[in-house]
Image (cartoon, grey):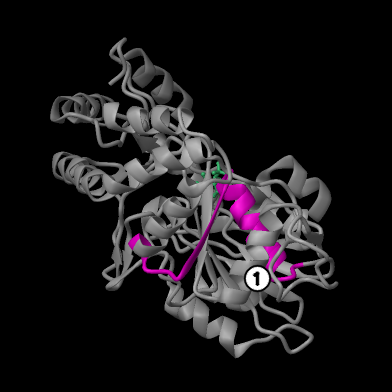
Amino acid sequence: MRADGFIPYGCQSIDEDDIQAVVDVLRSPIITQGPTVRKFEQAFAEKVGAKYAVAVNSATSALHIACMAANLSEGDELITSPNTFVASANCGVYCGAKPVFADIDPRTYNIDPIEVENRLNKDTRIIVPVHFAGQSADMKRLKKLADAHGTRNGEKIYLVEDASHALGSFYFDTPVGACEYSDVAVFSFHPVKHITTGEGGIAVTNDRHLYERMQMHRSHGITQSPEYLERKSPGPWHYQQVILGHNYRITDIQCALGLRQLEKLDQFVRRRREVVDQYNEALAGVPNIIAPFEAERSHANFHLYVLQIDFERVGISRTALMTELREKKIGTQVHYIPVHTQPYFQKHFGYKDEDYPQALAYYSRCLSFPLYPKMTRENVDHVVSAIKRVTCR
Ligand SMILES: *Cc1c(COP(=O)(O)O)cnc(C)c1O
């Protein structure tokens, strides 16, 4: 709850200990590209069970370096879910590739492997499953599909998980990010996500080659590593730009916050789960709404609490409901406007709204309700009674 009593749909949890860690770096001699970035990467990789991590200034950048490291380029296709933030598709467009969408499973709201299979062809180079609201996509089936197909050059199809929602989630018994069924997994540290660095993101992998290429892409395509140098080094000042990269670096100031936040992840996940349980219990049996479905294989961290509401039967439009809730100091949000309906994607790639009927149907009914670790039981009660008042009148 904010000072004015408003309950937003999502909110970071920052305490004095986090603030002190940031201040400590500000007082230290190195505030970027220093030891704290490295420490954060190591702690993060260990937490999710991956070998390597490359921390960057956003998850969008992390998706982009992953695509570049996999050599995604013009003539290639990237398949992702329409039910995601635009960044999951834009990373492919940055590389000149065509973004292709595969419709969602109406129960999990995640990409449907059958729809992926229908779109695989010789131009497919990358599949980007999105673990919507923290529930893992069906990675085993997607990995099988990727392995059974190849690109036109006989190369493999990469799996890059957009795990922006899924830090702290498990798929069967493995933490999301261990990359058991993928090449790279990407996480976001935007303030509404599980842990924050203000802005920030990370790409994790078990593949040393991808790791080193992502590191180069983070910083201009520059390297000092003997393995990648194309000419003999004349001295210790020397570096070489061997590919075209960007400046996607994150600061030590941000990573100090990230390190402290990471220590609290389990606590954040636990508290979110309690809030979700309270919602589910209180809303059981309420007509015209569908609560989140959890597949057995998935142990979601619950990034979002999404209800599907039959607005027509309830007799209120989504806009009217959002406005009414806002007056009661309750924030809600829509996740997501299907990416293929965005003007940019329709103009440049010819998509039509009706191309992905499941995503569209879901979109017409979804609404995300407040969920964050600092929510109290009273906050949840307040939201629940507001929902009941509207849907049961
Ligand atoms: C938040 C988010 C992103 C982008 O993350 P940034 O760190 O803001 O770049 C990408 N994909 C999904 C699914 C997200 O939720």
x and y percent of residue 131 in the render? 44, 59
Element type at mark 1: strand
Residue 285 visible in the shown view: no
The residue nearer to you, when weighing 118 against 131, is 131
Residue 6 visible in the shown view: yes
Horizontal side of 174 relative to 207 (left or right) equals left
Q: Crowding near pointer 1: few (<14 within 10 Å), some, many (20+)?
A: many
Q: Which residue is mark 1?
A: 126
Residue at image location 46% in from the left, 64% down from the top: 105
The residue nearer to you, when weighing 37 against 147, is 37
Q: Decide if ligand 1 comes within 8 Å of the CB at mark 1.
A: no
Q: Is residue 4 magenta?
A: no
Residue at image location 43% in from the left, 79% down from the top: 140
x and y percent of residue 199 in the render? 53, 37
Q: Amino acid at mark 1?
A: Ile
* Corner quadrant of residue 223: bottom right
Horizontal side of 391 relative to 310 (left or right) equals left
| Quadrant location, the N terminus | top left
Q: Residue furthest top?
A: 4
| Quadrant location, the C terminus | top left
Horizontal side of 188 relative to 44 (left or right) equals right
Residue at image location 71% in from the left, 46% down from the top: 247
The residue nearer to you, when weighing 305 against 351, is 305
* Corner quadrant of residue 15: top left
* Corner quadrant of residue 344: top right
The residue nearer to you, when weighing 350 against 10, is 10
From the viewer's perspective, is residue 80 above or below residue 341?
A: below
x and y percent of residue 338 in the render? 59, 48
From the viewer's perspective, is residue 348 above or below residue 97?
A: above
Q: Which residues are magenta?
A: 47-72
Residue at image location 46% in from the left, 38% down from the top: 197
